[in-house]
Amino acid sequence: MLRQHLTIEEYTKEIGEAVSARLSTSLPAAWEVPDTLRQAMEYSLMAGGKRLRPLLVVAAAEALGGNREAALSVACAVEMIHTYSLIHDDLPALDNDDFRRGKPTNHKVFGEAMAILAGDGLLTHAFYSVVQASREYGVPATAALSIVEELSRYAGPGGMVGGQVADMQGEQGVTDLNQLRYIHAHKTGDLIVFSAKAGGHLAAGSPEQLEALERYGRALGQAFQIQDDILDLIGDESKLGKKTQSDVKQQKVTYPYFIGIEASRSEVDRLTREAKEAVQDGKVPNPQRLVEIADMLLRRDH
Amino acid sequence: MLRQHLTIEEYTKEIGEAVSARLSTSLPAAWEVPDTLRQAMEYSLMAGGKRLRPLLVVAAAEALGGNREAALSVACAVEMIHTYSLIHDDLPALDNDDFRRGKPTNHKVFGEAMAILAGDGLLTHAFYSVVQASREYGVPATAALSIVEELSRYAGPGGMVGGQVADMQGEQGVTDLNQLRYIHAHKTGDLIVFSAKAGGHLAAGSPEQLEALERYGRALGQAFQIQDDILDLIGDESKLGKKTQSDVKQQKVTYPYFIGIEASRSEVDRLTREAKEAVQDGKVPNPQRLVEIADMLLRRDH
């Protein structure tokens, strides 16, 4: 079957499987790393999940005619960052979650100390995976360095880590809608923006193309997070793999809390349109998969 | 006063001050990062310490005729990595230390959750500092990418994080001398090796020069760690800024535990000679500071 004839669900599955295959060979070799550390890193990395960020890296690269193989290495990097953030987020000192994706969280299986170190290991190794894209798949050093720069910025203290801090402080009762938008933009949004832009860098995108991908990622990330808030309120527990209304129980304020479910749904629709328009203005040669991803996220029930 | 007339103590002080100055401007701007997160990162980063690793980056770069300004950005990166490792190491789930360098540890001041996130922030931002060396001081992208690659390798699961895991498992009673050597080589040694080699990359060192710096760093790192074990047994509490014999109390096995104090001292002497010889075989044009650093570490009493 020709690639362009795959439905978006088939395309997503194909990329997800390619990412999982690449991830399983992207950790350091067993002889290089203490056994338990490798097991702890692998446990969370291979626990599944949507692989949305890797999908965006590959789809954005391909939207500009870029190479899938190089994109898969950067896709692994972003999934390592996402996974480490979940491991640390689940720790007793933070969200104190016992389950993630229907499985016991990392620290419940390996202990707190190992979970902290497995997170540190994944975070550090993510940068190694970016360099591998350059070494093994011919990504120019300048492009790889731009990806390192953006990964450290979007995932760092001014990005994802900052969003995590704001979220934690929000639980202590200082949240208003602007604060919630800050949390969404950084805790979840930044890594989604990074993923789209990294695909652009890999395909040697122009500044205009990178800016289009950034706007796409920004709107998509917001839509995704509000949709998550909605699903968390109304979703079916078994599909989500975590307890619904857990945010309510933890006093975590969400988008529907501020503006209601229906207005939240309209906001998701609006942001989805905004994301699609960002890549459909002619600057991105093959935006179809990016558009389909936005629509697919709108349709999801988990 | 001409730079070459500085004593090694003066040179160390000069670099230490330059590193502290650069560090204080190298964190993200206040408006980019939640206040408390920035304070937590800064608290540990500016808490002093020997600044040994930054000194090695600069001295190794200068030994090959490299530029000090670019070296200072990479020196900041390695100090961020070192600092994050101390913050996470001190956490209750790991060493559970209340004091570090005579001050309350990060989690005692900011709480466990913030300490975990401040560590994550410093680790991530270290890679940004490497890119800055390229952006602001003209380090070629290929050299900067090699530094990113080595930083992720030496600080990652096969390096420092792996050493930390082995150390933690050692406390549970599985240590022999080989295991202790593994812990030393990775937990402490790898970042010291990285520092020397990064200086070499910054100065566009040849493969032979990089190999000489690697051997220097490897021997120096081992000597440094054994010396630390000795000082921890016999040193003066106020000079070390932490309780001596704390390792003994925690059942942490050390070099003197296996081979005695005198044999440990001989080993430090031998490794110091090995380090000096590595850079004195003619391949490194100006090895003097590197040699003096090795001698200075041998003389230290804290």
Image: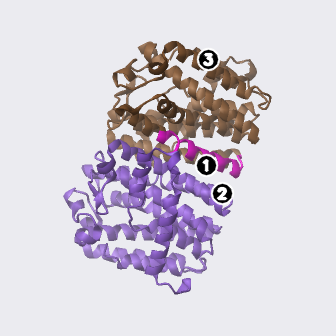
Chain colours: A brown, B purple
Screen quadrant of the C terminus of chain B? bottom left
Q: Which x, y percent locates residue B268? A: 36, 74
Q: In the image shown, does B256 or A212 lie closer to the viewer?
A: A212
Amino acid, disc 1 = Glu
Q: Are marks 1 and 3 on the same chain?
A: yes
Q: Which x, y percent locates residue B44? A: 39, 56
Amino acid, disc 2 = Arg
Q: Is residue B180 visible?
A: yes
| Residue on which the image places disc 2 | B135
| Residue on which the image places disc 1 | A149
Residue A92 in which image quadrant: top left
Q: Residue at x 46, y 44 (%)?
A: B34
| Residue on which the image places disc 3 | A269
The number of discs equals 3
Most distant residue in the left direction: B249
Q: Where A8 sits versus A95, above or below?
A: above
Q: Residue at x 37, y 52 (%)?
A: B87
Instruction: Name the secondary structure under disc 1.
Output: helix
Instruction: Name the secondary structure under disc 3.
Output: helix
Q: Does the magenta segment cover residue A148?
A: yes
Chain letter of mark 1 equals A
Chain letter of mark 3 equals A
Say whether residue B153 is left or right of residue B162. Answer: right
State which region is magenta.
A138-162
Q: Residue at x 54, y 44 (%)?
A: A126
Q: Which x, y percent locates residue B45? A: 42, 58
